[in-house]
Amino acid sequence: QVQLVESGGGMVQPGGTLRLSCAASGLRLGNYAIGWFRQPSGKKREGVASIGNRDGKIWYADSVKRRFTISRDNAKNSVYLQMDSLTPEDTAVYYCAAGAGGITSRAESYPYWGQGTQVTVSS
């Protein structure tokens, strides 16, 4: 049974930092492209970052470039999203997803999803 579990969410003040983790069981993340997505309350889900499985390619949404960093540790079967300089606009439920294709922001390209972790940025 494939399972992705996000952790590391919480509440932080503007300008703060969080590191999200995505741990997998039932599949080897190193064989998959991984995407991080977020969905603010009442809004559409959007792609945040994606990392390829073997080609080292990385994509970021314009809204998070130079603030967020995606990385993977295949030995730990985990993927991370380092989030710096957080703003209230980053408040959302964050999801990790795994797909067999290349990096993409298209949610439909990822068949495997975690349950999400809440990130709240507020003073």
Image (cartoon, helix red, strand yellow):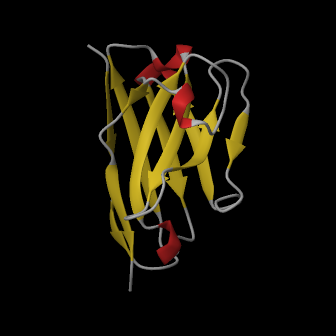
**In this picture, is 25 found above or below 38?**
above
* Quarter of the figure with the N terminus: top left
31 or 17: nearer the viewer? 31
Is residue 60 in view from this perspective? yes
Q: Where is residue 56 in the image (x, y as percent from the top left)?
A: 72, 27
Q: How many labels does the image show?
A: 0
Give the residue furthest to the left.
1
Q: Which residue is drawn at 53% across and 17% down?
A: 30
99 with respect to 5 (left or right): right
Find residue 89 and report its horizontal and vertical position in percent. Answer: 51, 72
Instruction: Give the percent coordinates (x, y) of residue 43.
Output: 45, 62
**Quick check: 73 above or below 80?**
above
In the picture, residue 63 is in which quadrant?
A: bottom right
Dividing the picture into quadrants, the one containing residue 35 is top right
Is 41 or 69 nearer to us in this picture?
41
Query: Who's the residue at 61% across and 44% down the image?
Result: 49
Quadrant of the image for the C terminus? bottom left
User: How far across and down, in percent of the image, does residue 73 sit?
Assistant: 51, 28
Observer-nearest of 7 and 41: 41
Identify the residue shown where x is 29% and y is 40%: 115
Vertical order, 80 against 122 (above or below): above
The answer to whether residue 57 is left or right of residue 118 is right
Q: Looking at the image, which residue is at 42% across and 62% down? A: 40
